[in-house]
């Protein structure tokens, strides 16, 4: 019982404890609430930093709580979980700041921020889960705690969105649960292991394992918005902007795709997945999702809906990188886990700013908006360039390594998919940039109030500017030892050299 | 340890009984103090017994030192201790809740009812503790009967027209159930010459007498446990009782009937128990799960939703019987899963009823369609209800999740895919009828809404039970270890994985 044992538990606990306290705070205690929010976010990052150092140096961090019979709650920090933990705790800090700026004048703030904290607790739990069972526990907890955030406004639209959200995610949860129990009946219970669980690698070719694999992948695939299970994501757009950021970049979608990554690499393992012949199917799903999401995005005029379809497409890059099951593609996919998060969260912050300051929700309204909100639109432009894959932004490196991986795996058609998708990315992002910077507004834009120093409240301005900066830095400094790309390389080495 | 296991057994029986008598004699204030004192002492006493049982194994206590077959034997193993702990926790919450519930009643007549509630409830509590401590089949009957009669009184305690009618509707079916059981006991005694469970275990053969006795007893218990098709009496009775009584009925009384069934129908009668029996119980359980869930989905009163949910949830326990036939590994999961399910359901359901009662106290009704915005106006109470719902739906982290996981694992391991689908389907139905409720409360309330003051005496007991239901899903190791302790009656031990 030392620090290495307890540390993995502390990380989800900080926000869990903060959430519980926040629930009981009276609405008007704004400062206390904001302080608690920020303090727990900063504390979480402070706890993650030593973990990064430790895992880099092969230290073991593992918390075990025996639950029942052979099932244990295991929280363990390995290189893959740390990538996700770091991403979500950094982005949570930013999103919290944004949410405070966005919602602190609203209603039901204690409820909102309480569940908000629970969400992040669940996400870090998913990241640190050391076996499938623990992963499911936090995964379902995430579903339950995001529901009140999606329905936060309580309007008819929000309630309907919440219903669709539950239908998809709880349904997927049931499939996952059956799949996991079936798996545990077939091969017993085991922790995640780089290269796959030995019991499975031994019995690869039996038919039930194939079915179980698909149950698990599709169960996670619903949150990862794999077509045709993506329907909830565009609908959930009615939620407030910080929640969308949370859904798309920090927590929900990421949790789904992270689950797929875990199933492929650490449950079945690279060898078994190749031997079982499930790889082609997964590549097909991912490729179809990438193209379908991009195509749908082009035809959306609602800003947030376009971003939502773009997420459908972009998240599947990660699935694609995982599905190719080759070292270089793995690097590309895992690095994109971070890159997509940072770029997409920037875009949602920007969309939120436009809605909050100018009440613009449609892309056709954005003409000339760059002059009124230059920093917001600047941040958006950087992120959009990254998504399209323009060097030196972070997104370029994801696509580069994915393409290399496709060549390495001798599947050149994937490069075609990536190219086509990039063209489509450009087709739906460039008009926004063009409208914002190069068009005259149709109606005069609302002027900035004289009392307002910046184009919008600094709490809302700082987060997108910061994440846009990070997008550029991650690209420029991709070769530095602790960049996501280098870390993804580290993960790759540990997965492929058991 | 300060006291021995035997002494804890004595406390668990004597304390609520003497409190009941004192309650009748003392003036109102002192009577309430006695109730609170009982509620304060019984949980640690049950925990003390649990610690003793964990340490030394099952405990037999011969009253007056007389050995069986002459004397009466009290018996505490892991299963009964767990049930005693459950009873003490829920019972304490109900006691505290009831005092505020009746004190803050809407009319003066209702406020007087606490005088009647307290002693009757304490006698019922004695009956529950006695039931879980009984080592013979006749004492089980006596305690069950005490419980039945006190339940009927408690349903009627509000004194309103609806509650008296509910009590009178409950009366015949409850008595019928008891009579079936008693008849079975009589036949059994005639055939075997003993009532002690341990002695019985060696004497039961495949003769017809035993089959008849078994059939009669099981029928009686099915009625008590409200298994389909004998479920129809439960929803109106549970829904029309005062909230603390609903919690008691759905949380503990139904569970007590299931407990007796566990004691007799899982090994004790092995010579006459055929796979057909187990299959029949399993199928009735499966129908209950689905039928109760479907009915819950159709109700427009919140209390009826929660009451039909009891019909659905009680069905899960009966899947135990076909699943334990499957072989040792699957049987172990089924046994642990079914008992944990009963435990999870009792805590969560009591929490749900207490929460609904608190909500009704605030808004004056339980009509679902008029609950728009309840989560905005009474967030604390709705939070308790939502946490209880989590367990009822079987979502993690909660006791219900742990139980469902084990049951499902047992079904898949033994290849009972049909039962597996029932377990999954019942969970989906529970999500549907509970999220239907939660969704209504999440809708924005009409303009000009405000927070309602929290009735603390009502909301806190509900919250404590709801939190317990969630925590039992995280700290399930200890209760499950307790459950493995020493059961010999009926040969439970062989199922332990």
Image (cartoon, helix red, strand yellow):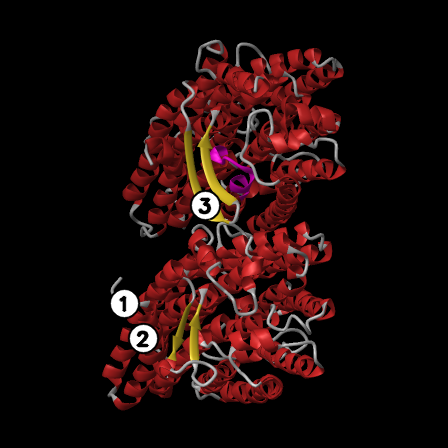
- Part of the protein shown in magenta: A127-136
Q: Quadrant of residue A295?
A: top right
Residue A66: x %, y % from top left = 45, 45
Chain letter of disc 2?
B
| Mark 1 neighbour class, 10 Å CA radius: few under 14, some 14 to 19, many 20 or more | few
Q: Assess whether mark 3 and mark 1 are in contact (beta carbons under 8 angstroms).
A: no
- Secondary structure under tag 3 reads strand
Distance CA(mark 3)–CA(mark 2): 32 Å
Residue A4: x %, y % from top left = 36, 31
Magenta stretch mostly in which secondary structure?
helix
Q: Assess whether mark 1 and mark 2 are in contact (beta carbons under 8 angstroms).
A: yes
Q: Is residue A135 magenta?
A: yes
Q: Assess whether mark 2 and mark 3 are in contact (beta carbons under 8 angstroms).
A: no
What residue do we see at 38% from left, 61% from top? B56
| Mark 2 neighbour class, 10 Å CA radius: few under 14, some 14 to 19, many 20 or more | some
The residue indicated by pointer 3 is A66
The residue indicated by pointer 2 is B11
The residue indicated by pointer 1 is B3
Distance CA(mark 2)–CA(mark 1): 10 Å
Is B216 situated above or below B440? below
């Amino acid at each position: 019982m030392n620090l290495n044992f307890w540390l993995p538990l502390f990380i989800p606990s900080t926000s869990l404890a903060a959430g519980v306290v926040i629930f009981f705070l009276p609405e008007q205690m704004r400062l206390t609430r904001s302080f608690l929010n920020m303090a727990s976010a900063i504390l979480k990052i402070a706890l993650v930093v030593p973990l990064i150092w430790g895992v880099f140096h092969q230290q073991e961090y593992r918390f075990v709580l025996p639950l029942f019979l052979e099932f244990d709650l295991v929280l363990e920090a390995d290189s893959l979980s740390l990538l996700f933990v770091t991403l979500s705790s950094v982005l949570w800090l930013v999103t919290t700041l944004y949410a405070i700026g966005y919602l602190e004048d609203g209603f039901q703030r204690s409820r909102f921020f309480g569940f908000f904290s629970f969400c992040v607790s669940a996400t870090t739990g998913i990241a640190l889960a050391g076996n499938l069972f623990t992963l499911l526990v936090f995964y379902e907890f995430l579903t339950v705690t995001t529901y009140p955030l999606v329905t936060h406004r309580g309007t008819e639209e929000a309630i309907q969105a919440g219903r669709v959200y539950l239908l998809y995610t709880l349904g997927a949860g049931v499939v996952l649960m059956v799949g996991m129990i079936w798996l545990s009946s077939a091969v017993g219970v085991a922790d995640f292991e780089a290269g796959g669980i030995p019991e499975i690698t031994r019995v690869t070719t039996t038919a039930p394992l194939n079915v179980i694999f698909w149950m698990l992948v599709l169960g996670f695939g619903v949150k990862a918005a794999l077509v045709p299970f993506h329907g909830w994501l565009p609908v959930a757009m009615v939620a407030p902007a910080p929640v969308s950021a949370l859904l798309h970049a920090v927590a929900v979608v990421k949790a789904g795709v992270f689950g797929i990554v875990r199933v492929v690499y650490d449950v079945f393992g690279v060898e078994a997945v190749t031997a079982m012949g499930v790889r082609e199917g997964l590549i097909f799903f991912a490729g179809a999702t990438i193209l379908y999401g991009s195509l749908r995005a082009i035809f959306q005029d609602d800003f947030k809906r376009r971003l939502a379809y773009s997420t459908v497409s972009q998240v599947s890059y990660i699935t694609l990188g995982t599905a190719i099951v080759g070292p270089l593609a793995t690097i590309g996919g895992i690095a994109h886990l971070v890159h997509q998060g940072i770029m997409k969260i920037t875009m949602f912050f920007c969309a939120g700013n436009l809605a909050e300051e100018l009440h613009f929700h449609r892309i056709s309204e954005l003409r000339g908006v760059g002059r009124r909100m230059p920093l917001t639109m600047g941040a958006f432009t950087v992120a959009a360039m990254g998504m399209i894959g323009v060097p030196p932004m972070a997104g370029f490196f994801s696509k580069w390594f994915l393409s290399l991986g496709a060549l390495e795996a001798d599947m050149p058609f994937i490069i075609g998919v990536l190219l086509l998708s990039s063209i489509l990315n450009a087709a739906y992002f460039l008009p926004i940039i063009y409208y914002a910077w190069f068009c005259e507004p149709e109606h005069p834009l609302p002027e900035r109030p004289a009392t307002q120093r910046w184009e919008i409240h600094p709490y809302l301005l700082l987060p997108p500017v910061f994440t846009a900066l990070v997008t550029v830095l991650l690209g420029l400094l991709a070769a530095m030892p602790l960049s996501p790309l280098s870390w993804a390389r580290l993960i790759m080495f540990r997965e492929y050299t058991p | 340890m300060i006291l021995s296991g035997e002494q804890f057994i004595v406390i668990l029986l004597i304390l609520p009984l003497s409190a009941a008598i004192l309650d009748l004699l003392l003036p109102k204030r002192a009577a309430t103090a006695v109730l609170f004192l009982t509620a304060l002492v019984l949980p640690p006493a049950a925990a003390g017994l649990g610690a003793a049982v964990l340490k030394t194994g099952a405990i037999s206590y011969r009253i007056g030192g007389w050995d069986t077959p002459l004397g009466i034997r009290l018996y505490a193993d892991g299963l009964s201790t767990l049930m005693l702990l459950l009873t003490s926790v829920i019972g304490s919450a109900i006691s505290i809740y009831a005092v505020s519930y009746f004190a803050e009643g809407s009319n003066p007549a209702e406020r007087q009812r606490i005088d009647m509630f307290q002693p009757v409830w304490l006698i019922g509590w004695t009956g529950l503790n006695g039931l879980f401590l009984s080592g013979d089949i006749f004492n089980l009957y006596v305690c069950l009967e005490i419980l039945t009669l006190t339940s009927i009184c408690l349903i009627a305690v509000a004194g309103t027209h609806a509650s008296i009618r509910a009590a009178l509707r409950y009366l015949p079916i409850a008595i019928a159930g008891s009579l079936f059981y008693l008849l079975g006991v009589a036949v059994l005694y005639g055939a075997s010459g003993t009532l002690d469970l341990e002695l019985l275990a060696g004497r039961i053969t495949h003769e017809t007498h035993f089959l008849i006795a078994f059939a009669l007893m099981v029928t009686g218990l099915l009625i008590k446990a409200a298994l389909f098709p004998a479920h129809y009496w439960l929803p109106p009775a549970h829904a029309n009782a005062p909230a603390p009584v609903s919690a008691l009925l759905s949380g503990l009384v139904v569970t007590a009937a299931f407990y007796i069934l566990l004691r007799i129908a899982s090994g004790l009668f092995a010579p006459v128990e055929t796979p057909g029996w187990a299959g029949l119980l399993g199928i009735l359980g499966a129908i209950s799960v689905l039928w109760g869930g479907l009915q819950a989905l159709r109700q427009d009163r919140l209390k009826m939703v929660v009451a039909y949910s009891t019909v659905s949830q009680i069905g899960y326990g009966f899947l135990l019987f076909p699943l334990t036939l499957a072989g040792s590994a699957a049987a172990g999961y089924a046994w642990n899963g079914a008992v944990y399910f009963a435990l999870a359901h009792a805590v969560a359901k009591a929490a749900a009823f207490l929460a609904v009662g608190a909500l009704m106290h605030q808004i004056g009704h339980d009509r679902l369609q008029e609950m728009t915005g309840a989560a905005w106006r009474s967030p604390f109470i709705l939070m308790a209800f939502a946490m209880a719902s989590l367990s009822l739906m079987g979502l993690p982290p909660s006791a219900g999740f742990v139980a469902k996981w084990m049951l499902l694992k047992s079904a898949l391991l033994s290849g009972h895919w049909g039962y597996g689908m029932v377990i999954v389907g019942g969970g989906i139905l529970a999500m549907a009828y509970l999220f239907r409720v939660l969704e209504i409360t999440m809708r924005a309330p009409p303009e000009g809404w405000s927070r309602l003051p929290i009735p603390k005496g009502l909301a806190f007991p509900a919250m404590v039970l709801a939190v317990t239901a969630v925590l039992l899903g995280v700290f399930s190791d200890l209760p499950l270890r307790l459950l493995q302790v020493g059961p010999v009656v009926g040969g439970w031990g062989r199922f332990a994985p």
